[in-house]
Image (cartoon, coloured by chain):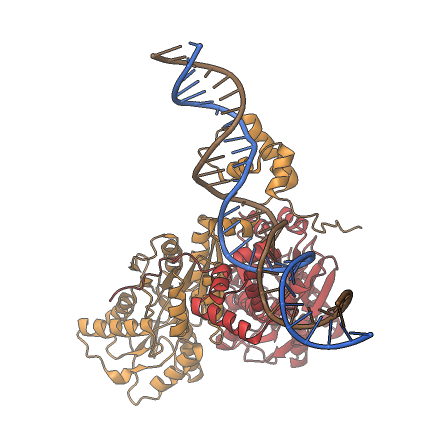
Chain colours: A red, B orange, C brown, D blue
Amino acid sequence: MTVPRNQRPTRVTLADVAALAHIDPSVVSRVISGDERLVIKDETRARVVAAIKELRYHPNAAARSLRTAQSGTFGLLIPDFANPIYAEIIKGAEQAADEHDALLLTGTALEDRPERYVRMLASGRVEGLLLASDRIPPDAIEAMIATGRAVVSVNQRIPGVQRMILADDERASRIAVRHLIELGHRRIAHIRGPVKSDTARRRLNGYRRALRTGGLQPDAALVVGNGYTSEAGAEAMRELLAMPERPTAVLVANVAAAIGALTAARSAGVKIPDELSVVAIHDIALAANLAPALTTVRMPLAEMGRAGILALLDEDVGADIKKVVRDTTELIVRDSTAPPR
Amino acid sequence: MTVPRNQRPTRVTLADVAALAHIDPSVVSRVISGDERLVIKDETRARVVAAIKELRYHPNAAARSLRTAQSGTFGLLIPDFANPIYAEIIKGAEQAADEHDALLLTGTALEDRPERYVRMLASGRVEGLLLASDRIPPDAIEAMIATGRAVVSVNQRIPGVQRMILADDERASRIAVRHLIELGHRRIAHIRGPVKSDTARRRLNGYRRALRTGGLQPDAALVVGNGYTSEAGAEAMRELLAMPERPTAVLVANVAAAIGALTAARSAGVKIPDELSVVAIHDIALAANLAPALTTVRMPLAEMGRAGILALLDEDVGADIKKVVRDTTELIVRDSTAPPR
DNA sequence: ACCTTCCACTCAAACGATTGACTGTTCCTA
DNA sequence: TAGGAACAGTCAATCGTTTGAGTGGAAGGT
């Protein structure tokens, strides 16, 4: 068996196609781009199409990009691929990009090398950047904005970024807490996200507001935690369980933290939901497979990814936007919440 | 507050830098690329560097790419971002790419549009492609190979792809089954992956071989399942639990399936590990947070991603490779395995 | 018979960086 | 003191597409 030696038979170019079709390269270019103003005989067009097919011609992306100053690629920065909520954001963004014939280059914002992403923008490799990570140093943010290209943050506010796609975090918390109050809980704790996180703050606000709306007095002692990781969630749960008067229910600000919290509760022999109800923000497929299956508030993650790409495509880079995606925020009741004993 | 209007002050080019430094563009180019053969006064070099800094010059990626015929970007195709094992592969690949100043464009192989990825290769947008998905139609594979660019499969064999990075799937199964046998199990089942999957087949082989090595006779009735999803795992577990004479232990071919299997067992009221030991292939952070914490065999996922990128960087596209990454394959015992009652 | 319009194309200048081949000084050596 | 090396750069072609501006002939109107 011989390996077909496609040893780069000198790349096929527009000129090759044009020569084969006995026509000027510019016509081939216009045929490919579907130029409306092109007037051409059907027969000639057919010759061009046939030549493209025969030579398996594919336009060179770099040349096109150089000429048009567009790369057809957008960037998306996330903190960690292993966190399933970003998988949802990526899916939404990828699909939206795909629908607009663009590519999506997703990367983790390696804290030590933020200038990589500034370069991506400044060099024109990507036309715009979606920021879904809160770990980008302020000076890198500033440098990104300074490139004059589209930069949009999703799922968070970032100082200096005037265009953002947000979910209604407050409302998500309120929905969750209302559920717990309706079940009869009075002593409701909150495992919150990172202190410096914008979403964590908004979820905390929603938690407080919902308590008051339900006629309960927020108790600062019942707010613990400082992180969106399962380790942070486990740590916070241990803190709650060590309290002299334990809460009967807890809202966890993020599903990753909730996974750790459930594990910590299990280790401590606490029965869920009998002794403690748990509800978390973010619904992912995994939630149904936890023990017990986790009650969650679904957040429009994929929708935010999609909206982010649409915002990048919107050519008006100057205009500020603050779009809140909310339509699919809803409570999904599973087995981790029940009335208090 | 006025928004700084970086309304594209007509892009900064090499010529601008050269003009500011009173030198020829070619010198600037050579300074930037670190050309060894360039002879230049220290003072001149300093002027160039200062001009670059002052203008915030960043070389245009498209122009460079057009001239050098290199894009500095590699592609990685996965079936699904939500599957945590791919997060590991991505991490390894991204880091390796980063170390070589390359970018990684990760995408899901949307079954309906495989030609997108052929185009990515053929248009020169990516220099090489890593295939970690088994859902790519054969004709798309063929078209990719036909571009003459580097294509390497990771974690699987793909017909037509002569370069691959594999893990030792057989060995992973053997390690897992040996563990079960050492615990005293005699009736050991296997929840296998997709029938057409290469890795699933190799894991099945390892399972059979380990049974024989342990003096046990493989029983075809104890091999169930056909998928790497949690749904498939749950379904397979139900099948096992419905058997008149239940197994006392099961090897699940993949951690996603294991998650579903655990859920199904829990729903059926089966105590793990008391009534049934479960061990799965692939170790991910989540495994420690399942109920019970899952015993796994760690596979070198990140290492495969890394090795894949290195293979793409290896310019010799013609040479076949079959590299097995194995160094980190090891058993991680948690709470889901115990001696049979 | 002359002018205009339409048709079906062709021409050539960009886009911005890279790179092999030169050029014009000094300085040294034989 | 002629010849060559070392120095410090300059020149210009090239990568492959896109796109505004042109061109020559046929058809149509007056």
**Residue A219 image point, x, y percent:** 69, 65
Front residue (pair B210, B335): B210
- Residue farthest toward the bottom in the current orientation of the protein: B244
Front residue (pair D26, B123): D26
**Residue positioned 52% across, 48% down in the render:** B64
Judge left or right: residue B244 versus residue A40: left
Q: How many marks?
A: 0
**Residue positioned 25% across, 71% down in the render:** B206
Query: Quarter-wise, where is residue D18 in the image?
Result: bottom right
Judge left or right: residue D26 versus residue B118: right
From this viewpoint, is residue A200 visible?
no
Query: Quarter-wise, where is residue A130 in the image?
Result: bottom right
Q: Vertical placement of A327 versus A67: above or below?
A: below
Quadrant where the C terminus of chain A is found in the figure: bottom right
**Residue A57 image point, x, y percent:** 47, 65
Judge left or right: residue A266 versus residue C30: right
Query: Quarter-wise, where is residue A332 in the image?
Result: bottom right
**Residue B167 image point, x, y percent:** 32, 63
From this viewpoint, is residue A43 visible?
yes
**Residue B79 image point, x, y percent:** 45, 71
Q: Vertical placement of A247 versus B128: above or below?
A: below
Quadrant where the N terminus of chain A is found in the figure: bottom left
